[in-house]
Amino acid sequence: MNTGFDLIVSSPLKRSLQTATLVATETGYKSRVLQSDSLAPEAALKDFRKLLDQYRDRDSVLVVGHNPSLTVFVGALIARASASPARIRLRKGSLAKLNFTQSATTLQYVLEPRIVRSFYAVPAKATASKSRRGKH
């Protein structure tokens, strides 16, 4: 996907840290993965907003956390002007890309886990085919 991040922030829980570290490795991220209680399961929306404000100067921030919190947080961000959060579905292992501007937050896309897994399956098959061709 040619995706890179200026910053990766994870919940301090083990599974999130493992996921964040894996993504960091796969995308060539060279800095340390930061941990934040603002992404822990018991975090509140105000904590998440504070985290985002803290890194507003970054172009591309990856956050790794837990459901249902992240689903609620993302819904609240994209329904900023509304009294109730937008309803979206972020399944375990989903990726969501948001675009932040002064006036609004826009949901760019949500990739379901099966789509994310397919990104890894395609290069593996292509590599296997190339190595088999060399043995003929």
Image (spheres, helix red, strand yellow):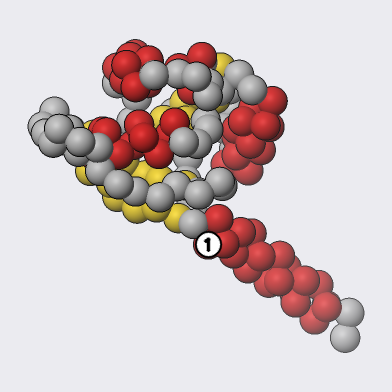
Rendered residue at 20%/36% (across/down): 84
Q: Is residue 91 above or below residue 29?
A: below
Q: Is residue 70 above or below residue 51?
A: below
Q: Nearer the viewer, residue 106 or 72?
A: 72
- Compared with 13, 21 (above or below) is below
Question: In the drawing, does residue 122 fall left or right of residue 6?
Answer: right
Picture mark count = 1
Q: Where residue 72 sits in the image (x, y, percent)? A: 36, 35
Mark 1 neighbour density, 10 Å: few (under 14) some (14–19) many (20 or more): few
Q: Residue at x 45, y 47 (%)?
A: 90
Amino acid beneath label 1: Ile
Q: Position of residue 42 (x, y in %)?
A: 50, 19
Is 38 above or below relative to 136? Answer: above
Q: Outermost residue, right direction?
A: 135
Left or right of residue 111, residue 103 in this image: left
Quadrant of the rendered structure where residue 50 is? top left
- Residue 26 picture quarter: top right
Instruction: State the residue position of label 1.
Output: 115
Residue at the spot x=34%, y=53% of the render? 109
Q: Position of residue 66 (x, y in %)?
A: 53, 33
Mark yes or no: residue 23 visible: yes
Q: Residue furthest bottom?
A: 136
Residue farthest to the front, as pictured: 84
Q: Is residue 25 visible?
A: no
